[in-house]
Amino acid sequence: MSIFRWDRGDNKDKSDGIIELPVENPTEDELTDINEAAYDSSSQSLDNKMEEIYSTKDKQVKFRRHQPLEEEAAARRKEVTKDELIRGKLEFSMPEKINAPEVKLEPELDPNATVAEDIIEDVVDVKKLRNIYVQDIDEIDVSLDPAKAPEPQNAERQDPPSAKKPPKSYTPSGDTIVETIPVYQHEDSVDKLYLKAGRFTDVVESEYDEYLKSTDPTISGNYHATKPMVRPHQSLLYTLTQIAARHKSEAAQKQKNKEIMRNNFDEQAPKPKKKKRSRVAKFFRVLGAVISSGFNTPSEDEQVRAMDYNSNEDEQYIFETTRQNIKHQLTHLLLCLLIGIGMLGLTIWERMAGAATVAANGAGSAFTFCGLYLILTFALGLVARHTLIDGLKPLAHFKFNCGTVIALAYIACFIQCLVSLFTSTSFVGNDHHLYSFVVAFALILNAAGRLLMALRVKSNFKFISAHSPAYAAKIYDDVETARRLVSGTTSSKGIIAYQHVTRFLSDFLKISYAPDPSEELSGKMAPIAIISALVVTVIYAIIFKSVQGAVSALTVMLCIGIPFTGMLAGNLPMLLFSRKMLREDAMVAGYPSVRQFCDTNAVMMSASDLFPNGSVKLEEMYPLQQYRISENLLLATAVLREANSPIAPVFDELVMENNNVLPAVESVMFEDKSGVVGWIKGERILVGNMKLMNRYHITIPTTEVPFKKRGNGLEIAYVAVAGQAVAVLGLSYEASEPLKTQIQRAERSGLALIVSTNDANITPELIAKRYEIFYRSVKVTAPGYSNVIDEATDKVEEASRAYVATRGRIGSLARAVGGCISVKSNISLGIVIEIFGMILGILLCATLALYASVARLSIVELLIYIGFWVAATLIAELVRRP
């Protein structure tokens, strides 16, 4: 509820001269009507009105909450003559809940002051404001006149004129000057302040607060004339920074001048001579670098967890990291192999001539043998420290991985070597044997598996980063539709694979370095091996009461429980499979890719994938009309291209003769098992079999067309335009040999082909005959399901997970998916053999150790047993090639 008060100037009694009108939130029109009513109450001249309004003797203008009228109200006010101004005092009383600061202006004006007709919404140039020109009682215009601004009292407090933008000159009508306000110098270059309606007081208060917070010493309230103020460019830190930058710039310029001078002369500056080092020093330097490599760097698995291929900018970094990983794994493999050869030589010496040498030379030979074995064991642990540390880390959380048993077996072997130093004669040709070579053999196989993994990642990443069109393989997620699509085929489940274009293949490194089932199984079998070793050791110590025997029993039980093919059984077949897929323009990242597609039983595709450009040939053509035959065939070509039919490429020569210009197709549709129907410029074009012609009542002049090659497998297609038969086509459908081989391999893996087509000649029988597969392995879908297939395969994604990728050929997809099924079965067979060999070995060693002592378990017998099961596992995985 607002109150509008009008105080007439001629009424001496203020209580009688005030009219209060209650207005419920006064609008613009209501305020205008009140003003007009006030304007009608007087008819005096403009000069008298101005003298009476702006007399400073007993009147002042007070604004408690200024709310200027809008443009529309001002336009109405323009029509009122100036001699109808309000006499008296206007006062707006706002609600009490708005406690806005009060601004009082007490103008002292000359009678010749004029009033502007327009509302001025800007405050012009408030930098050096000294004079205010009041042009309207509803709006206040603050103008800057630099000519009338007083000179500053202190020259040092004024910024140079060049640093300030010269203000805009603004000359209002009249020369009357109102009371001046404090000078405000804005921190930035500000020419205007834009005020919203009724917000003048708040803006002035806000700007004045900023004015008091200014860092300028001439404005800030904390400024003292006696205390010098250090500006930023005068501080010691600033000075030192500038000096350092200048020295750096001078050094860079000197280096640039030296390079320019060196390039200008034929003779280059002599290079400093390198100090020659002896070959022995070079050997130890290289050996120290190899052994110490990676002490301060995380392991390969930790590096993989910390990074992944997220954008094209990561390519160089991933290539470099992969090369370094291959280099490290190859170095570790070679060093483990050298140490293993040394241990094998000592073992052969111990078996062949150890006992005789000890008998002839005494215990010194046995001690030397045990000491050398201890040194080689220590070197083996130093080289393979990453594998051993990674195997021991999960034990802190009572977990196990592929390297846990290897690490524990190495510790047992090292302890056994230390014990052998005190009883060396018992380890040479007697009751006990050193088993460090078994651990060396396990580490060699482990390093070989990791090296194969790194090689697979490198070759696959070249495919990923080739900047060529990539198609990501997916599994169709609509279960009900998939079940209907595979109905009628040999497949029992509706798990259908397809591919579509993708712009980026993500999560490549995570998929590539993910553990395979053999590696996972090694971690699950680790508790069995550890518990069995501890139980046998305790029983052996109780039965035989021998420290050396108990340590040897613990060592041999842990060695026989090592998963020797844990890293090799999964990575070797995956490397061979991925290399083969790369040769066929497909990429399989890792075992998660195999797990993703191993249950697939069908692949969806279009007829153009099975019969690409060049597979369908026009053998013969029998024209039924000679008039406009080329134009009619051109119309049929336009319809076939719009429908993406495999027949369209047979008319490429005709299209080239017309400068590749085809008429616009209005609509096109495919009728099931009949053909294509299209509309061009109001004419209906038909391309299909006799069933389509009969449906649209097209008469074929001759039912028996004299084709010479009809007995050789030609397919017939009819063309009709505007209700008239135009021509009869004799077409041959051929399958390329590479694609046929890929489709046949996919069919042997249990995959069915789900084909969408708009060519009536492409039937399951035709596809089965051309590709030499079982006809029940092929299904040609109806038009409705063809749209589903086309929608899925034509999709384009910004990023897709890099399980399986191709270059777009359907043969590559079918080959990769079928290969995933075969690899899954091969690795599963290898895992079964590995488990059986490990369990059997633990039982045999435990039986022999407890019933005949560990003297029966020599290292030669262990190597023969381990080598047999390693070979059996790998052969079983590689016999059936994917």
Image (tube, rainbow, N blue to C red):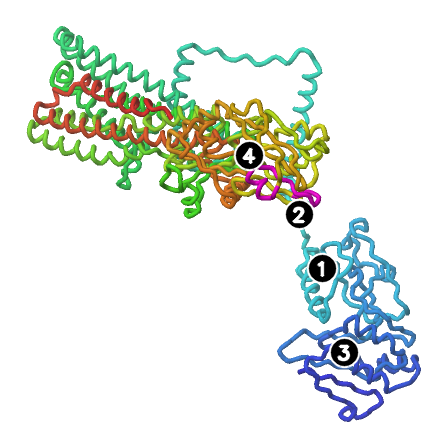
Q: Quick one: label 1 or label 2, which is nearer the N terminus?
A: 1
Pointer 4 or 1: first along the chain:
1
Q: Which residue is mark 4?
A: 313
Check residue 827 for magenta coloring. no
**Residue appearing at x 22%, y 24% in the figure:** 413
- Residue 650, labelled with which disc? none
Quadrant in which the C terminus is drawn = top left
Say which residue appears at 68% left-offset and 45% top-offset: 233
Q: Say which residue label 2 marks.
A: 232
Q: Earlier in the sequence, mark 4 or mark 3?
A: 3
Q: Return the residue at label 3.
A: 29
Determine which residue is flagged by label 1. Answer: 219
Q: Is residue 372 left or right of residue 714?
A: left
Residue mark closest to the camera, 3 vs 2: 3
**Identity of the amino acid at label 4?**
Glu
Tell me residue 178's x, y (percent): 83, 71
Q: Nearer the viewer, mark 2 or mark 4?
A: 4
Residue 460 lies, with reference to residue 146, above or below; the image says above
Residue 623 percent across, percent down from the top left: 66, 30
Q: Secondary structure at mark 3?
A: helix
State which quadrant residue 796 falls in. top right
Q: Which residues are magenta?
A: 679-697
